[in-house]
Amino acid sequence: MTLIHQTAALALLALLAAGPVVAESRVPEAPPASPAVAGLCLEGAATVPAARAEASKDGEDVKIKTQDGQELSATFYASKKKNRAPAVLLVHDAGANRSPFEKIAEGLQKRGFAVLAIDLRGHGGSVTADFDWKACTKEDQTKLWAFAQRDLEAATAFLRDRDGVHNSNLSLVGVGAGAALVTKYALQDENARAVVLVDPQPEAYGYDMYRDVFDLGGLPTMILAPSEDRQQAERLQKAAHEGNNGVEYVQFKVLKPEKDGGPLTDKRLSKTVTDFLQDEAMDKR
């Protein structure tokens, strides 16, 4: 073997030994969009979407297609008023579904909003043989939660395309880990007018809400959390104000959920959210 061949062989061996270079990411990135995606958590996954409770008389059950071919179950609440309605997207917590949003959705609907409550992939009526949150390991749940940004993109596209909906006036309400999803999404959607973060979990499933609220840049925001989570909620509020040169634009209120109930059982929640969004997103006439 010549000296040139020896040098080339050694270089090749060194390259193989080094292995692939893996880029670090603060939030797990979903693979590029494609007509169909490989499933997660296949072992023990459901083959039939989970059943949903009877639809609200004021809501229309719909199916929404994502860019990567997933079909999401959702309920659309058309505005009760004839003018172009501001849109609101309701996003549930990890492992939950859209059904507890009914009272909030109907309250917003009566005030003139067009509302969409979705089941994210792998949740509720959007469980498939490919995606099932309950069958996932913790690691796969983090990957699945990263895919959920695509679900929000599909949901907001649905709202923009509906007749009677204001296509450049969007508010987002997220619960628990869903609060991290809507905060991240609001950073990239120029139509976002306001966000409501209900009992936010700032560092769930690979997200960093402290950094994201810092970047919101004064977008009207309300944080609602039970007293036991007050300290972390106030840390989020502080991070947002620091990102906006100390301007205090984030409201914070303490939730009082029913005993042994989740944050959505607070009897004042629907009115609190509706009042805030009406002040911030409804056109004044």
Image: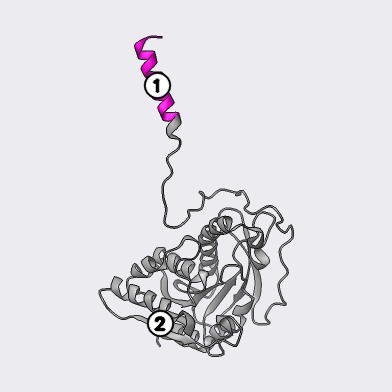
221 over 272 or under it: above or below: above
Q: Give the image location of residue 23, x and y in percent.
A: 41, 46
Quarter where residue 60 is shown: bottom right
Q: For the C terminus, give its image quadrant.
A: bottom left
42 over 181 or under it: above or below: above
Query: Overall secondary structure of the magenta stretch?
Result: helix
Residue 10 tag number: 1
For the image, the number of numbered tags is 2
82 over 170 or under it: above or below: below
* Residue beneath the point at 70% across and 57% down: 45
Q: Give the image location of residue 264, x and y in percent.
A: 57, 82
* Residue beneath the point at 74% across and 60% down: 48
The tag earlier along the polypeptide, 2 or 1, is 1
Residue 152 inside the magenta-drawn segment: no
- Between 51 and 11, the one lying in front of the other is 11
Quarter where residue 129 is shown: bottom right
The residue indicated by pointer 2 is: 280
Q: Amino acid at mark 1?
A: Leu
Q: Give the image location of residue 219, x and y in percent.
A: 36, 74
Q: Determine crowd level at label 1: few under 14, some 14-19, many 20+ residues with C-alpha closer than 10 A.
A: few
Residue 226 in view in this figure: no
Residue 22 in view in this figure: yes
Quarter where residue 50 is shown: bottom right
